[in-house]
Image (cartoon, coloured by chain):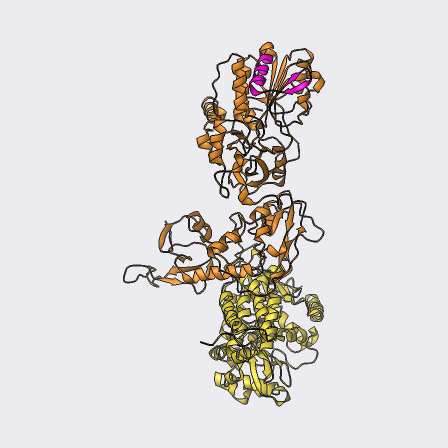
Chain colours: A yellow, B orange
């Protein structure tokens, strides 16, 4: 099988990715329709877990563990391990999945493709996870701006219920589990797992203090697992093709197919499905057609706006997996890659990013609420040529004052790009600052 | 017993307290804003950050690993933690700003953030002087500001409801107010709107913040964002003094502080008492402070040819004694009062007994259905239970009427109430009999028939005890001075006024706004002596000691026992 080619970290550095066959978004016309999906072997994985002895719930969780699947929502937490945190079933106490389709981070647009082109894979993944953890209901939380795809998924979900693939006594078995599509109202913070829960409960989306974690006290105080859309979409692949197959795709410690959302100054921006562990340079140069207009690359944000930016000279040999990116000084995040060419003004880039976090801070915790606005003010002032070198120092100090001091990770997410962009492109920032009136010591 | 180490000092603890509360209870002050002991813990202000560590345990034996000096090896957490949300555990080690520069720095950083968009309007802010943000900034905050931009502008002077006004810019988003309406008053009338730095509390669209407990959010607001529409800009906190007391709007006996400036009560705020009202006070209890200031009498009056005329105290006492002495004792109707203290009612009972009259009765002030089962009761007087325990029963109007018509009422002695306004009599009906009246206000309708009008000290001017509907006996302290000399009151005032903001040489000795009145426990012995009875002057403390000794219903209710939070008296069955 060609997949064996991706069995180790080195393989991503060859051209073997060219022969990769898409599994999450296979090239099938009208796959979003129930009939087409079923016609192409859809819901066989669900049928298997519900009917075959070998797929008892615990076995599914073991398979998820063995596959090495890590969350695709940004944090990269091992999925099987997360599933195993769910407490034993307690009569009278409902259990939930919250499936996170609130993707709102700048540079991230891959869940949208799944929900548009292959929603049944998501539904099937949800139902397999529901079986694995004996879930009563799943809330699929989709950002409100995806209005078209929400409508279209609601239609497909209705078909699913009609055909007996969801709801009561799924496929004629004793297993019942519901799926509810919940429309967000357009707040980035709702993508944070606990504020997503608050939002589903109809409350203001303020992240919760952890512990207790959602597996102990989630939706309405009941055990809940929060998984990303793409993460759950991997579940049918693991059942159909086996955990070993999955573990063999892409990077060894961060395996599986993954949707790369490539945007910015490239010739062919878009969502591309390839194994993890791809060379960043391959993704930019070969997959996305190179930097637009033949220009030189200046910077890459490998996983959505919150992960640290990498200078072009830092990406040589770096592959898209947690390990390699950590060594390079960044993170995998959501694999939403943002490429910037040599003409990019990094101060302007940072100004735009800080504006986003200022706008999206929920305002619950003091450091993030006040810090994000102050940071935007400072970066704006520097961009407008009115900043001073002292402002740069204050910016870095504000990052220290915000990081790790809030309920959720949004303050960290807001501080990292600031710290890293300034550290990695300091000369650009200094060039925009006013001349100091003080002698340099 | 499990132990915890805070700043290298070991403390034993029981149960599972939250770290911040434990620290506050043990004199380890930690700055905080959003935490309130009666509300849920949101940990959103991030001010109470501390370093927390757990001892390293040997994996096999489970024993705590120790270093060469025998001290436990502590593994400190990777991040600082909000102490308000930490559940304490055995062996836990904590470093506050007293032993950790990191924590000290974090507290300073956080206060810098809180002040970034906080308006610098302390000179005109009602909260200034008792503002947690101001106080904690002095103690823990940075000097000056590094913020050189426009502050965020938010709505100001927003009328949230009839009693509460919002200044959105001062708000630091602690959510105490919204949690109060969600968790305590359960009116759900406040929520945070907008997002991020523009956040502020607001009512849902179309909703008015008319919660009967709405003003509590003013007390718990750690800044001047929520202010009292009534009290706004009325007085600076450091020009006022407060005295611990109870509210007399109803029979709950909710604990409060009366805030006084220049001998005028300007506001009433709750005083914590876990047995009665926790930290809260209904709005109706706070709204009635004007009655302590307005329409107060200016000395005793006696009826002459031209109606009630001013008289000095001695003359008024003598006239009262004379009128009572001339009537047949058994035909004097004594009316006690649920507004008066236990001591005053007790002295009246003694006087009635000495003159051979039947025991006093009291006029009930009950509005059925007015209560809410919490801090608002149907009974609108503070001491009906105290009266009942003294054997003072609710008056039977039919019986009184029958006695009046039969000519069996030769004189009326009414303590701190208004029999005419209550409908017990018409003024004309008692015009011809001698009436001695202890009154609070010049608007008392019984004054029309009174022969001797004795101005009585109200709860804010006297010392005495009240028994709540639930049988909780509590004493009060004087909050403001009255005209004239009463050594007991002078002495009590010296200890009662919490001059936390004032100076020792003060405005209370200023004669302005001092009411010319006396406590009934001072007046009654004077009248008794005029009737030839050998009554010595006694302070309320002594009177209460006597009551507690002689009446089983008041067992243990001495001033020493009552202290500042009262004592729960034993049930006395259905006396009433």
Closest to the observer, A127 or A54 = A127
**Residue found at x 55% / y 12%:** B356
**Residue found at x 52% / y 51%:** B132
Q: Is residue B441 left or right of residue B4?
A: right
Q: Position of residue B446 (x, y in %)?
A: 67, 22
Q: Position of residue B516 (x, y in %)?
A: 58, 27
Can residue A277 be seen from the camera position used here? yes
Q: Position of residue B53 (x, y in %)?
A: 40, 60
Closest to the observer, A49 or B457 = B457
In which image quadrant can residue B461 be found? top right
Above or below residue A224? Residue B508 is above
**Residue found at x 66% / y 25%:** B444
**Residue found at x 59% / y 72%:** A381
Closest to the observer, B478 or A101 = B478
Above or below residue A433? Residue B296 is above
Q: Residue furthest left?
A: B68
Closest to the observer, A282 or A273 = A282
Can residue A4 be seen from the camera position used here? no
Above or below residue A203? Residue B478 is above
In which image quadrant can residue A199 be found? bottom right
Task: Tell whether position A2 is magenta.
Answer: no
Count every numbered label the image shows and give the total. Answer: 0
Q: Is residue B393 left or right of residue B135?
A: right
Range of magenta residues: B302-324
Q: Position of residue B167 (x, y in %)?
A: 63, 53
Query: The C terminus of chain B appears in which quarter of the rendering?
Result: top right
């Amino acid at each position: 099988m060609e997949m064996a080619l991706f069995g180790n970290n080195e393989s991503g550095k060859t051209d073997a990715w060219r022969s990769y066959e898409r599994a999450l978004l296979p090239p099938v016309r009208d796959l979003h329709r129930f009939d087409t999906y079923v016609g192409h072997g859809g819901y066989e994985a669900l049928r298997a877990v519900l009917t075959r002895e070998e797929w008892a719930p615990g076995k599914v969780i073991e398979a998820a563990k063995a596959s090495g699947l890590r969350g695709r929502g940004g944090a990269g937490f091992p999925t099987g391990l997360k599933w195993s945190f769910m407490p034993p079933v307690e009569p009278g106490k409902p259990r939930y999945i919250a499936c996170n389709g609130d993707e709102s981070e700048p540079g991230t647009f891959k869940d949208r493709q799944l929900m548009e082109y292959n929603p049944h894979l998501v539904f099937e993944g949800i139902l397999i996870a529901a079986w694995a953890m004996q879930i009563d209901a799943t809330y699929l939380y989709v950002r409100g701006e995806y209005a078209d795809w929400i409508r279209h998924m609601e239609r497909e979900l209705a078909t699913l219920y009609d055909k007996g693939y969801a709801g009561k006594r799924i496929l004629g078995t004793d297993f019942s589990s519901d799926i509810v599509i919940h429309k967000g109202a357009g707040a980035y913070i709702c993508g944070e797992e606990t504020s997503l829960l608050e939002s589903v409960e109809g409350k203001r989306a303020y992240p919760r203090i952890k512990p207790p974690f959602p597996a102990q006290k989630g939706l309405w105080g009941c055990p809940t697992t929060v998984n990303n859309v793409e993460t759950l979409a991997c579940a049918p692949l693991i059942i159909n093709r086996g955990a070993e197959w999955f573990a063999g795709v892409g990077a060894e410690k961060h395996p599986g197919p993954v949707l790369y959302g490539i945007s910015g100054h490239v010739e062919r921006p878009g969502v591309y499905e390839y194994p993890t562990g791809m060379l960043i340079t391959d993704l930019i140069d070969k997959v996305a057609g190179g930097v637009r207009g033949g220009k030189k690359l200046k910077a890459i944000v490998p996983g959505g706006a919150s992960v640290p930016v990498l200078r072009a000279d830092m990406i040589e040999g770096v592959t898209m997996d947690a390990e390699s990116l950590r060594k390079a000084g960044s993170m995998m995040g959501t694999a939403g890659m943002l490429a910037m060419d040599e003409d990019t003004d990094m101060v302007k880039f940072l100004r735009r990013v800080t504006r986003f976090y200022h706008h999206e801070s929920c305002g619950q915790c003091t450091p993030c609420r006040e810090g994000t606005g102050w940071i935007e003010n400072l970066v704006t002032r520097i961009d407008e040529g009115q900043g001073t070198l002292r402002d740069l120092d204050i910016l870095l100090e504000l990052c220290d004052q915000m990081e790790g001091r809030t309920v959720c990770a949004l303050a960290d997410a807001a501080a990292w790009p600031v710290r890293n962009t300034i550290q990695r492109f300091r000369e650009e920032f200094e060039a925009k600052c006013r001349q100091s009136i003080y002698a340099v010591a | 017993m499990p132990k915890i180490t805070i700043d290298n000092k070991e403390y034993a603890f029981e149960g599972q307290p939250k770290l911040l509360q434990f620290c506050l209870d043990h004199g380890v002050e930690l700055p905080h804003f959003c935490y309130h002991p009666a509300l849920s813990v949101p940990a959103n202000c991030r001010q109470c950050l501390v370093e927390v560590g757990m001892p390293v345990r040997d994996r096999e034996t489970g024993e705590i690993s120790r270093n060469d000096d025998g001290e436990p090896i502590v593994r400190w957490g990777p991040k600082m933690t909000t102490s308000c949300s930490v559940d304490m555990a055995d062996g836990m080690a904590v470093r506050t700003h007293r032993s950790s520069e990191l924590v000290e720095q974090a507290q300073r950083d956080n206060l810098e953030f809180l002040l970034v968009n906080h308006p610098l309007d302390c000179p005109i802010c009602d909260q200034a002087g008792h503002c947690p943000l101001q106080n904690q900034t002095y103690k823990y905050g940075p000097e000056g500001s590094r913020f050189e931009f426009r502050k965020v502008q938010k709505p100001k002077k927003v009328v949230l409801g009839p009693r509460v006004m919002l200044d959105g810019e001062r708000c630091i988003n602690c959510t105490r107010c919204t949690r109060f309406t969600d968790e305590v008053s359960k009116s759900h009338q406040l929520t945070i709107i907008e997002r991020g730095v523009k956040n502020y509390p607001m009512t849902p669209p179309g909703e008015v913040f008319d919660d009967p407990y709405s003003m509590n959010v003013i007390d718990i607001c750690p800044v001047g964002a929520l202010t009292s529409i009534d009290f706004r800009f009325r007085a600076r906190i450091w020009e006022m003094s407060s005295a611990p007391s109870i509210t007399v709007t109803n029979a709950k006996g909710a604990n409060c502080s009366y805030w006084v400036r220049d001998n005028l009560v300007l506001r009433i705020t709750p005083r914590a008492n876990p047995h009665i009202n926790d930290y809260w006070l209904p709005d109706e209890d706070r709204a009635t402070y004007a009655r302590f200031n307005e329409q107060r009498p200016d000395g005793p009056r006696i009826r002459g040819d031209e109606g009630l005329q001013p008289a000095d105290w001695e003359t008024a006492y003598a006239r009262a004694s004379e009128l009572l002495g001339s009537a047949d004792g058994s035909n004097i109707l004594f009316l006690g009062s649920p507004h008066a203290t236990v001591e005053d009612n007790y002295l009246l009972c003694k006087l009635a007994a000495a003159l051979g009259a039947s025991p006093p009765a009291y006029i009930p002030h009950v509005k059925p259905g007015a209560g809410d089962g919490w801090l608002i009761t149907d009974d609108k007087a503070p001491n009906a239970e105290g009266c009942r325990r003294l054997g003072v029963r609710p008056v039977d109007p039919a019986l009184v009427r029958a006695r009046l018509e039969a000519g069996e009422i030769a004189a009326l002695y009414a303590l701190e109430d208004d029999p005419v306004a209550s409908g017990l009599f018409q003024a004309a009906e008692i015009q011809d009999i001698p009436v001695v009246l202890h009154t609070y206000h010049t608007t008392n309708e019984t004054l029309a028939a009174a022969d001797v009008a004795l101005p009585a000290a109200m709860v804010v001017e006297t010392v005495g005890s009240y028994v709540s509907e639930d049988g909780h006996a509590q004493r009060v302290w004087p909050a403001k001075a009255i005209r004239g000399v009463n050594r007991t009151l002078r002495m009590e005032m010296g200890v009662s006024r919490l001059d936390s903001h004032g100076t020792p040489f003060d405005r209370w000795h200023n004669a302005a706004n001092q009411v010319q009145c006396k406590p009934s426990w001072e007046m009654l012995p004077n009248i008794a002596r005029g009737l030839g009875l050998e009554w010595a002057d006694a302070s309320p403390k002594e009177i209460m000691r006597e009551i507690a000794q002689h009446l089983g219903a008041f067992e243990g209710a001495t001033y020493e026992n009552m202290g500042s939070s009262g004592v729960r008296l034993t049930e006395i069955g259905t006396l009433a």
